[in-house]
Amino acid sequence: MNTLDDAWNWYVSTRQNLMRMNRLARKYWNDLPWEKEIGRDDEFRLLEGDDVRTETERSLEFIDDLAIVVLFSVFEQVVRSHVQIEAAAEVDKILHPILRKAAGDAIEQIETGSFARVVEPYKPAGNADLIEEVNQVRRYRNWVAHGRRGEQPPIVDPKTAYQRLSRLLIVIGAGGGS
């Protein structure tokens, strides 16, 4: 996935198909035409509807949190790449060796350093609330990605995360979700 929209579309279609499969298992599994080809398909013939229902419910239980991890990871890479390209263009204009070295160090930090420091400079431009909303997504993502240890931060649902992240992409000039 290269764009926030790619990540969002993955989440929506995956969640929707898990819900469809769950519904099929709950309501129609025993009525499927097992005497036809589906009953000879090794991927289906040995499955029980209750097992499919249980497995899809387990998947659905975690899909929203997994979506937050995926959405933020893709978002972070898009932001880092965009800001790094913009900063690199400015470094080429710097003549003084000390300033050029400092700018090079800054680019390295954009690529590998704290992500909070990458977006922090956008706060003074009237985006403090949006940066904080994005930081809430980041904190929730970190909590999920590190095994849900410690105090749980406020929950951020995938749609809210997608909207917040898309808005910040527009602010920094990296487009919307694309």
Image (spheres, rainbow, N blue to C red):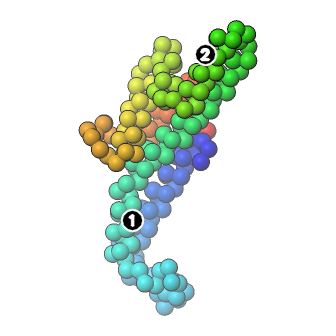
The three-letter code of the residue at mark 2 reads Ala
Vertical position of residue 124 compared to residue 140: above or below: above
Residue 83 in view, yes or no: no
Rate crowding at label 1 as few (under 14), some (14 to 19) or many (20 or more) other CA atoms within 10 Å: many
Number of the label disc, if any, that sits on residue 169:
none
Residue in view at x 51 percent, y 84 percent: 42
Q: Secondary structure at mark 2?
A: helix
Residue 125 in view, yes or no: yes
The three-letter code of the residue at mark 1 reads Thr
Between residue 83 and residue 59, name the one nearer to us: 83
Between residue 174 and residue 25, name the one nearer to us: 174
Number of the label disc, if any, that sits on residue 56:
1
Q: Which residue is mark 2?
A: 102
Between residue 133 and residue 151, name the one nearer to us: 151
Residue 70 at x, y = what percent? Answer: 49, 46
Residue 154 at x, y = what percent? Answer: 31, 36
Residue 59 at x, y = what percent? Answer: 39, 60
